[in-house]
Amino acid sequence: MITTLTFSSTLAAPPETVWRWITSFDGIAREMSPLMRMSAPADMRDLSAIDFRPGVPMFRSWIRLGGMLPVDYSDLTLLELTPGVGFVEQSAMGSMRLWRHERRIAPLASGCRLTDTLTFEPRFGGRLAVAVVRRLFTHRHRQLRKHLGETSTSLPRGR
């Protein structure tokens, strides 16, 4: 069952600030906390500073429930990385047959809109796995609005 979910928030922060946030492992950790945490090599602080090679896995990231219990892995792979605009990640994961995460920043007169589009197919868990992904990204957008300011929001859409 392939599922697509879209989450979008209109943030008060300028696009440059949001770009720094969404490409830093500190920003990613703050978005996911306290629900989950993704590991990264000690010297990896920022996706935008990597030697980007489309489609080549960068490293294996362990996904830990509550920051402690390993529950999944992701062989983090970017297909696109456009500074200031967004990225497309399509990574092999233990729990997913397909995982594609597109994250885009659209400048606005005041702040910007950040949109996450997820297309995925769970290996197991079906509707429960979809509910977990929905819960995690609803939480991530709540954290984004908390830390980067909010001008308006839109609820997640999924099909």
Image: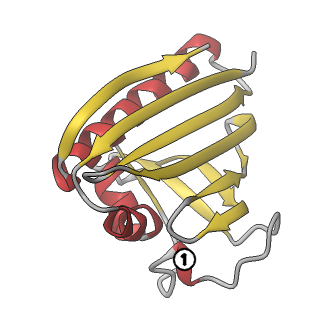
For image coordinates 51% across by 40% down, the residue present is 116
Q: What element carries label 1?
A: helix
* Quadrant where the C terminus is found in the figure: top right
In the depicted structure, whether residue 99 falls above or below residue 62: above
For image coordinates 81% across by 69% down, the residue present is 56
Q: In which quarter of the image is residue 45?
A: bottom left
For image coordinates 26% across by 38% down, the residue present is 142
Q: In which quarter of the image is residue 147?
A: bottom left
In the depicted structure, whether residue 48 falls above or below residue 79: below
Q: Position of residue 148 (x, y in %)?
A: 22, 55
Local packing at callout 1 (Cα closer than 10 Å; few below 14, some 14-19, many 20+) is some
Q: Position of residue 23 (x, y in %)?
A: 47, 67
In the depicted structure, whether residue 27 falls above or below residue 52: above
- Using the image as rendered, state which of residue 30 and residue 158 is in the foreground: 158
Left/right of residue 63 with respect to residue 138 in the rendered view: right
* Quadrant where the N terminus is found in the figure: top right
- Which residue is denoted by mark 1 in the rendering? 48
Q: Where is residue 15 in the image (x, y as percent from the top left)?
A: 37, 62
Q: Where is residue 82 in the image (x, y as percent from the top left)?
A: 62, 67
Q: Quadrant of residue 35?
A: top left
